[in-house]
Image (spheres, rainbow, N blue to C red):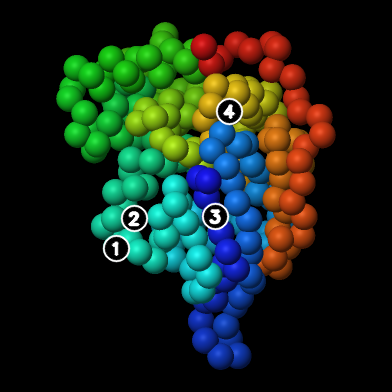
Amino acid sequence: MLIEVELLAKVYGEGASATHALRGVSFAIEKGEFVAITGPSGSGKSTLLHILSFLDRPSSGVYRFEGQAMDDLTDQGLAKIRNARMGFVFQSFNLLARATVLENVTLPMMYAGVGQKERERHAREVIDRVDLSHRLGHLSQQLSGGEKQRVAIARAIANEPSVIFADEPTGNLDSVSGHQILRILEDLHERGHTIILITHETYTADYAQRIIALRDGRIESDHRVAKRHSTRDRHFVK
């Protein structure tokens, strides 16, 4: 099992002013799943993402990643796993504006200690998967929003992570670019990647194979998607 969560709770503050962001959430995610975590503002999905991605710790409950309990790890240990085993795609892209596409994608491999020749070779490969080889030398600030998000996806898979967390990846994109990004994520899933998508949009969640819906810090529903979008007309991930 890739991810196991048991009675996870998160409380901010104390006493009468305490805010219960998560209230006893339990679920498991197997390797290779494509899961959308949905819910309105204040439902707890951002808090859950921060815990699942080792950016925060729960107030109570158990979280196991690849069989290892979060409580057994130091902050340094969490950071090491996060850098090596997790990839991230953010709504705001989080690219270095004055770095080229190639430089942005090689960055996580540099932090992982990969040699220059190997990281440039592999970066070119993953950039080609998102059909941006013609933009290798362009600065990220010269790209469209959809192109920036494709660079972010290439960066996220550069270290071959166990899981990709996509946090509202279409939030800053028009509908056409948004569907392109979702098709890339869908194709990555079909090639074996585990995807956890955080979204409040129904059409975005429908690309997943399973939807966990949160409301007021609790799981409202957890179900499989009966009919998924077709990826017959792929143009991006190769």
Viewer-nearest of labels 3 and 1? 3
| Distance in Å between CA atoms under marks 3 and 2 | 16 Å
Q: Which residue is mark 1?
A: 74
Q: Amino acid at mark 2?
A: Leu
> At 63% across and 56% down in the image, what residue appears?
27
| Distance in Å between CA atoms under marks 3 and 1 | 19 Å
| Distance in Å between CA atoms under marks 1 and 4 | 30 Å
Q: Are marks 3 and 1 in contact (CB under 8 Å)?
A: no
Question: Circle 4: is it few (<14), some (14-19), or many (20+) Cα within 10 Å?
Answer: some
Q: Amino acid at mark 3?
A: Glu
Q: Which residue is mark 3?
A: 4
| Distance in Å between CA atoms under marks 2 and 4 | 25 Å
Judged from this view, the residue extending furthest toward the right is 226
Of labels 2 and 4, earlier in sequence is 2
The kind of secondary structure element at disc 4 is helix
Q: Amino acid at mark 4?
A: His
Q: x, y (%) of residue 53?
A: 45, 51
Q: Nearer the viewer, residue 62 or 88?
A: 62
Q: Are marks 2 and 1 in contact (CB under 8 Å)?
A: yes
Residue 56 in view here: yes
Q: Which residue is mark 2?
A: 78
Q: Amino acid at mark 1?
A: Thr
